[in-house]
Amino acid sequence: MKRIIYTNDDGGVSIIVPTGTIEACIKDVPAGKAYEIVDAAAIPTDRTFRNAWKEDLTVDMPKAKLIAHDKRRAKRTAEFAPLDVQATIPSKAAQAEADRQVIRDKYDAMQVSIDSATDVATLKSIVETL
């Protein structure tokens, strides 16, 4: 099975899965966009960093790191949420702040790991710990 790939306006890769002939689906590529026809098997099955794919279907590491940081921030925010309430209660504020610092330290270390990752496998293993 064949697929049509092209770089969209935000720099990501779009993939068209033909429902008919490949020739009939080429009209779905935006005007003026260069495209390539590839075997479906060439498209990675791991979609962890899908929004960081380049036209050659490899992962753009700087973009993948941004995705990993977004996931890290979302998880950290979720962990902070119950402590945000406790921090407003005078009898629980000191403990809440101590607990918040533990979370900060954990995610600061993760930030350093993401920034120093040199390959997709390492970055994926960090994201999987979230």
Image (cartoon, helix red, strand yellow):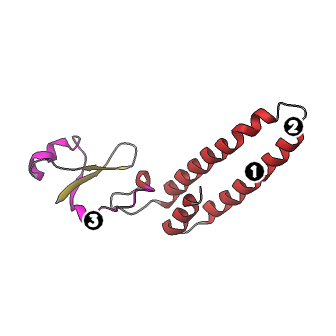
Whole-angstrom CA distance, mark 2 to mark 3, is 54 Å
Whichever of callouts 2 and 1 sits on the residue coming sooner in the sequence is 2
- x then y, percent, for residue 18: 16, 49
Whichever of callouts 1 and 3 sits on the residue coming sooner in the sequence is 3
Which residue in the structure is indicated by mark 1?
A: 104
SS at circle 1 = helix
Whichever of callouts 2 and 3 sits on the residue coming sooner in the sequence is 3
Say what amino acid the circle numbered 1 marks: Arg
Q: Nearer the viewer, residue 95 or 33?
A: 95
Rendered view: 30 above or below 124? above
Please name which of the two marks, 2 or 1, marks the residue nearer to the observer.
2
Callout 2 touching callout 1 (CB < 8 Å): no
**Quarter placement of the N terminus:** bottom left
Which residue in the structure is indicated by mark 2?
A: 93
Please name which of the two marks, 1 or 3, marks the residue nearer to the observer.
1
- x then y, percent, for residue 6: 28, 51
Disc 3 crowd, CA 10 A, few/some/many (<14, 14-19, 20+)? few
79 relative to 123 in the view: left or right: right
Q: Which residues are magenta?
A: 22-49
- x then y, percent, for residue 4: 21, 53
SS at circle 3 = helix
84 relative to 16 in the view: left or right: right
Say what amino acid the circle numbered 2 marks: Ala
Q: Which residue occupies the extreme front position in the image?
A: 91
- Say which residue appears at 64% left-offset and 63% top-offset: 113
Q: Which numbered dot is residue 61?
A: none
Which residue in the structure is indicated by mark 3?
A: 42
Whole-angstrom CA distance, mark 1 to mark 3, is 40 Å
Disc 2 crowd, CA 10 A, few/some/many (<14, 14-19, 20+)? some
Say what amino acid the circle numbered 3 marks: Ala
SS at circle 2 = helix
